[in-house]
Image (cartoon, rainbow, N blue to C red):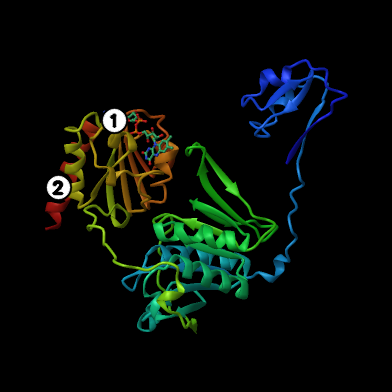
Amino acid sequence: MSIKIDDELCTGCGACVANCPYGGIELVDNVACIQEGCTLCGACVEVCPVEAITLEREEFKVEKMDLSQYRGVWVIAEHYKNKVHPVAFQLLGKGRELADKLGVNLTLVILGADFEDQLDALSQYGEDEIIYVKSKVLKNYYSDLYVNILSELILEYKPEIVLIGATPTGRDFAPRVAKRLNAGLTADCTGLDIEEDSRNLRQTRPTFGGNIMATIRTPNSRPQMTTVRPGIFKIPPKVKKDVKIRTLEKKLEEKDSVAKIVKIITKEKQKVNLEDAKIIVSGGRGVGSKEGFKIIEELADVLNAEVGGSRVTVELGWVDPDRQVGQTGKTVSPTLYIACGISGAIQHLVGMQNSDIIVAINRDPNAAIFKVAHYGIVGDLHKVIPILIKAIKEVKAQEK
Ligand SMILES: Cc1cc2nc3c(=O)[nH]c(=O)nc-3n(C[C@H](O)[C@H](O)[C@H](O)COP(=O)(O)OP(=O)(O)OC[C@H]3O[C@@H](n4cnc5c(N)ncnc54)[C@H](O)[C@@H]3O)c2cc1C
């Protein structure tokens, strides 16, 4: 991009100088003249009354790709201590749906060592094929090796869609692979679908602080790459089918990576595992106080559930940060989610709307949470919850 001033048109009025936020333009001999501070922001162009200043942009050319060469949906599995992260199985469930709509194969890709014994068990999530890139070095995660190997594989096999977990590891290699391939990458998607009249992937994710859900398409390049946070999609029921296993042996040594793993420090085991909880009872500002949360804990107790909270309750110090549900907290999909005194802001909903059954207790009948709730109770939670606890205890007593 460059900026040009037509000396003959310039009248030396100084409007550009007055409006430049960076001191990037001055009058020299009564003619506007670009200075070092110019950032090419274009403010001067807009205010020039005689159109003497022009910004020249190079045309951005989209190279035409032959999209028809790309077929298939891939899920990249990550693992730690030889255990595949569950987000891979969640992505296989969604991947199957997308592959069926496109009429193509679904492939699970693992870069690892010593997975031979697990391949049968890993074949039960609906995929048609597993590509197992095997090397003793791939026992651990090396960022650059993942980027090199995945980029090469994608260039060779040409999948049209690549799904990756938005875990710290996935967030590390996914954008680097996308850059290497000049492909699009949409991070932190909460919804994926196929556009009917084209083969484009519709990638939906919250944007502008979660106030808008944007649907992004990548119509000109392949593959279409996506990261999805754990817990957004459900693990599909297991199926028995013939899965083609393709093992690719890689002769790699640790020195092939620019990184050297000196020590792996395992994070202290999480006290709360909201993502795996079957039942969650969450409280919001409506609970009223930290002490008020006792009623939420009591309900969670009788249901054998975990306690969650909205961001407000975390900010108020009523709930620990690792219990926050939502866009900047955990994404959960339990069989039962009970939202107590939570209004249903979009940032909260994106973290829990995939729960099987949502029960909302709120004294405002117009609260947004009721739009996603399967069952709604309009009332004061401090009156409703004790009744619920009593009823649950009675049912449990009868069952004994
Ligand atoms: C970038 C960004 C990221 C964010 N990330 C998150 C996130 O991850 N998670 C999250 O939760 N929020 C997040 N937020 C904040 C979000 O926008 C809301 O402010 C927040 O979710 C509101 O919390 P709340 O529902 O507890 O409180 P409020 O919106 O104040 O709602 C309280 C509700 O309680 C009801 N109520 C009050 N008293 C009672 C009672 N006695 N009995 C029954 N009902 C009662 C009220 O009717 C009301 O509906 C984020 C915001 C931004 C900008």
Q: Where on the picture, by quarter, is residue 68?
A: bottom right
Q: Residues within 10 Å of mark 1 (few under 14, many from 20)?
A: some
Quarter of the image where the N terminus is located: top right
Q: Amino acid at mark 2?
A: Lys
Quarter of the image where the C terminus is located: bottom left
Q: Residue at x 24, y 34 (%)?
A: 317
Please determine whether, in this image, residue 89 is positioned above or below residue 312. Answer: below
Q: Is residue 322 left or right of residue 164?
A: left
Expressed as whole percent of the image width and height from the top left, the position of residue 224 reads 60, 60
Expressed as whole percent of the image width and height from the top left, the position of residue 256 reads 46, 75
Please determine whether, in this image, residue 180 is positioned above or below residue 297. Answer: below
Q: Which SS class for mark 1?
A: helix
Q: Which residue is mark 2?
A: 393
Q: Is residue 95 left or right of residue 298?
A: right
**Cβ at disc 1 under 8 Å from ligand 1:** yes
State which mark lies toward you, 1 or 2: 1
Please determine whether, in this image, residue 124 is positioned above or below residue 102. Answer: below
Q: Quadrant of ligand 1?
A: top left
> Disc 1 versus disc 2: distance between alpha carbons?
24 Å
Q: Residue at x 28, y 48 (%)?
A: 280
Q: Amino acid at mark 1?
A: Gly
Q: Which residue ends up furthest to the right in the rendered image?
A: 8
**Cβ at disc 2 under 8 Å from ligand 1:** no
Q: Which residue is mark 1?
A: 286
Q: Residue 6 or 44: which is nearer the viewer?
A: 6
